[in-house]
Amino acid sequence: MSNSDTHVLSAQDCLVAVMVTVSASDENIRTSELVKIQSAVNNLPIFAEYDIDRMNVVSQIVFDLIEQEDGLDALFGLIRENLPERLYETAYALACDVAAADGKVAGPENRLLEEMRYELNIDRLHAAAIERGARARHLT
């Protein structure tokens, strides 16, 4: 993957990248998380015009970046550059849904969500409401 490929992310690519990053954060991508990502891409209006084949490209960008020492910083930089600010809370909500998909949010996922709140400047009160909603949707 050439470096120029990583700079042509659409807003939807950024949302997919956030979801994939959360899923991969604990080094164990669960089926429930993949189903949640697929469901979001298939059903949410923001993805209506999205080319589903881009998911593999975006996932590879995420995997390549998170293997690097400062890869997470680079990833958040790409997201801030390419995702409109009005979609920051959407990105956080999707991340929370993926994190909660397996019924528990712990350790690395929690730390990544905390980092995401900071990087995307999500208001703490808004973040708490988003997190609460994700928990409520994923109770068994």
Image (spheres, grey):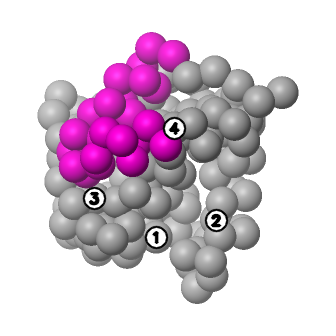
**Real-space CA distance between mark 4 and mark 3, rounded to the nearest whole angstrom:** 20 Å
- Residue 122 among magenta residues: yes
Which tag, 4 or 1, sits closer to the chain's start?
Answer: 1
Residue 105 x, y percent position in the rendering: 56, 23
Residue under label 1: 12
Q: Is residue 98 visible?
A: no
Q: Nearer the viewer, residue 102 or 68?
A: 102
- Residue 91 among magenta residues: no
Residue under label 2: 41
Q: Which mark is residue 79?
A: 3
Density class for disc 2 (Cα within 10 Å; few <14, some 14-19, many ≥20) is many
Q: Which of 83 and 52 is in front in this view?
A: 83
Give the overall secondary structure of the magenta segment: helix
**Real-space CA distance between mark 4 and mark 1, rounded to the nearest whole angstrom:** 21 Å
Instruction: Identify which amino acid the numbered label 4 is placed on.
Output: Glu
**Real-space CA distance between mark 4 and mark 2, rounded to the nearest whole angstrom:** 20 Å
Residue under label 4: 131
The residue lying at 18 percent from left, 28 percent from top is 69
The residue lying at 70 percent from left, 25 percent from top is 103
Q: What stretch is highlighted in magenta?
A: 106-129
Quarter of the C terminus within the rendering:
top right
Instruction: Identify which amino acid the numbered label 1 is placed on.
Output: Gln
Which tag, 2 or 1, sits closer to the chain's start?
Answer: 1
**1 over 102 or under it: above or below:** below
Which tag, 4 or 2, sits closer to the chain's start?
Answer: 2
Asked if the residues shown at circle 4 and circle 2 are in contact, with their CB atoms under 8 angstroms apart, the answer is no
Instruction: Identify which amino acid the numbered label 2 is placed on.
Output: Val
Q: Can residue 33 be seen in this view?
A: yes
Instruction: Identify which amino acid the numbered label 3 is placed on.
Output: Ile
